Amino acid sequence: MKNFLFLLLPFPFFFQLKAQTAGCTFKQPLITINFGTGNIDDVNTDDLYNYRRVSRSCPTDGHYSYTSYTSDCFRGDWLTLTEDHTPGDADGNMMLVNASYSGGSFLTTTINGLKSGTTYEFGVWLMNVCKISEKCPFPLLPRITIKLEAPAGKIVAQFGTGELMRREAPHWTQYRAVFTTPPTGTPLTLTMIDSSPGGCGNDFALDDITFRECVKQTPIVTAAPKAPAVVKRQPAIPKPVVKKPVQKKQTPAPLKRQAPASEIAKRATDLPAPVTPVLTPKLAVFPSPPPVLKNRANPLVKQIEIEPGEIKLDLYDNGEIDGDTVSIYHNNALLVSHAKLSQKPITFHITVDAAHPHHEFIMVANNLGSIPPNTSLMVITTRTKRYEVFISSTEQKNAKVILDLKE
């Protein structure tokens, strides 16, 4: 269930979180916010401009609640959650947020007890609670920005989750990042902001906010083994036969031959090389492909190495508007369902970075329109480049486009 991602953030910066920080062993959580059980006091320590607390398990736009479940919210538009994320707590609460149309802060609280000048890991579990539905083909997905501020308002760290994707069943995902507390230590103010405007698809749950201290590991340095010393054998000197006392002649010691440069180089290469650890990047774990991806061919149309940053993708009908509809899967998860292609683009955004270097998009033809096959144009826009990919799919063959982080 866990999706471990995080990124070292020495300064305020947006992030998609990646694997364990080098040199750190994290202790058990020093601080945990799990929203308790039952009717708890509000975690928010400041008044919020665009959000109000309610006691319902299906809060409406611009409201939040602390609840242990959801049930048939908004005529089935939300997933049904029978429990929160915290393992083993009976009737434990999660925080459930129905996005405000104006966006803004939904959580502001004070964090005490952190040491000064110390590295900590921040973690939070999140879930988009909106169902994948034809009623919401172009969702406004939550994009959570997280800030930690010192008392004078100076930002200690700032990071973001990227878009919280909708899924076909409840699925908690943990987001983590590391930061270093200022010399003055705590208190710090934790603020969480939904950067997307409210609307279809922008509702979410969160639970188990944690702070864990990083204990630096001491590296073990192993010296390379030395080459064995080469002992030259001296030639045997025959013992002289003495018939009468004679004057012994001094035999000069043999001169050592200087080995040629090629032989010296060869000896150097014979020495064992120092052992360098090989770091293997953690592979992204995708959900199992649905039947429509298993039962059809998925030929690769285009693979592009792309610069890091936020990427915009627009999908148009390629040619005459003839009623083509498509579903789009991102890394095996349904992103868009039964969307009609036209001159108006289907637009979505992703973030390509070291934490998320590989993105697979598979276009599935739901029909062939009036002029087979199902054809579309994908326009990929980065900060500096624009790519056009022409796509054709049928009821037997999908079409795959891959974006990889440029090294």
Image (tube, rainbow, N blue to C red):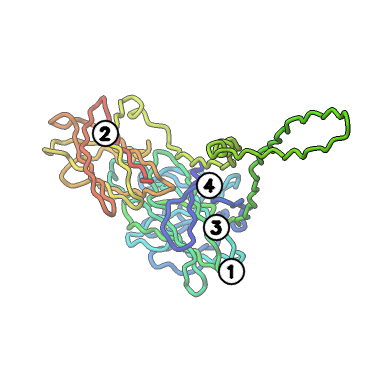
User: Reading the chain from its start, which is encountered first: label 1 or label 3?
Assistant: 3
Residue 267, position as x, y percentages in the image: 59, 37
Residue type beneath disc 1: Gly
Q: Looking at the image, is mark 1 or mark 4 nearer the viewer? A: 1
- On screen, residue 92 above or below 272: below
**Category of crowding for the residue at label 2, using alpha-carbon neighbours closer than 10 angstroms: few (below 14), some (14–19), many (at least 20):** some
Name the N-terminal-most of marks 1 and 4.
Answer: 4
Q: Earlier in the sequence, mark 4 or mark 2?
A: 4
How far apart are the two marked residues, 1 and 3, measured between alpha carbons? 32 Å
- Quick one: label 4, few (<14), some, or many (20+) residues within 10 Å? many
Question: Which dot marks residue 39?
Answer: 3
Q: Which residue is mark 2?
A: 301
Are the two marked residues, 4 and 2, in contact with CB atoms closer than 8 angstroms?
A: no
* Badge 1 element: loop
Residue placed under numbered mark 1 in the picture: 185
Q: Nearer the viewer, mark 2 or mark 1?
A: 2
Residue at position x 62%, y 38% in the image = 257
- Camera-near label (4 vs 2) is 2
The disc at residue 85 is 4
Q: Amino acid at mark 4?
A: His
Q: Amino acid at mark 2?
A: Val
Most foreground residue, 295 or 49:
295
Mark found first going from the N terminus, 4 or 3: 3
Report x, y in % for residue 196: 34, 57
Disc 2 from disc 1: Cα separation: 53 Å
